[in-house]
Amino acid sequence: MFLREAEPMSAEAARLMNPLRLAYLGDTVWELLIRSRLVYAGKNVRHMHQGAIAGVNAQAQAQALHRVEPLLSPEESAIVLRGRNAHSRHPVPRHQSPADYQAATALEALIGYLYLTGQEERLLQLFQYTQQEAEPCQRSN
């Protein structure tokens, strides 16, 4: 169970939320999952930091979204579309492509939506799938 200060919100209330607000929270939840995975893997602090940077950037999040898109429900796909089409008021960070940044925002919006609606099991299922696909050689050891 995830830490939360309030009860999960209804799917309808979360769907009505600005997708950038969903992405704001989803970015933090994604980073917590990545960092937790690194801690459980027994990495040293330097390797955890490098792994977190590698797993939380726009390119990595865009790749994760592309891996899970075929698994999404119509409702989840609608959240992803809203996140992808959301326009932030700041420029794309340096060294990131606009397409990757849009896809990363879409993934973050989905993660935020699943978290806010209390769908932790689904959130973890999608996260674990992205990590299995991202690290095939580490699975075989």
Image (spheres, helix red, strand yellow):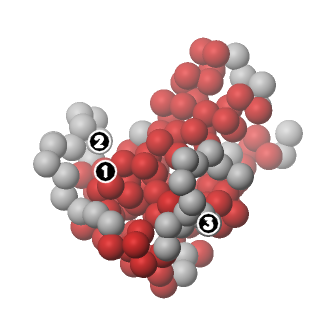
Tell which tag, 1 or 2, sits nearer the viewer: 1
Percent x, y of residue 6: 54, 54
Q: Which residue is at 46% across, 57% downward?
A: 112
Residue located beneath label 1 in the image? 101
User: In the shown orientation, is residue 136 left or right of residue 15?
Assistant: right
Front-most of 131 and 141?
Answer: 131
Pointer 1 and pointer 2: residues touching (CB < 8 Å)?
Answer: yes
> Is the residue marked by circle 1 packed among few (<14), some (14-19), or many (20+) residues within 10 Å?
some
At label 1, the amino acid type is Tyr
Query: N-terminal of the two: label 2 or label 3?
Result: 2
Residue located beneath label 2 in the image? 96
Q: Is residue 11 visible?
A: yes
Residue located beneath label 3 in the image? 119
Number of numbered discs overlaid on the protein picture: 3
Quadrant of the rendered image containing residue 16: bottom left
- Is residue 129 depicted above or below 36 in this figure? below
Q: Which residue is at 60% across, 64% downward?
A: 118
For label 1, the SS is helix
- Is residue 61 depicted above or below 48 in this figure? below
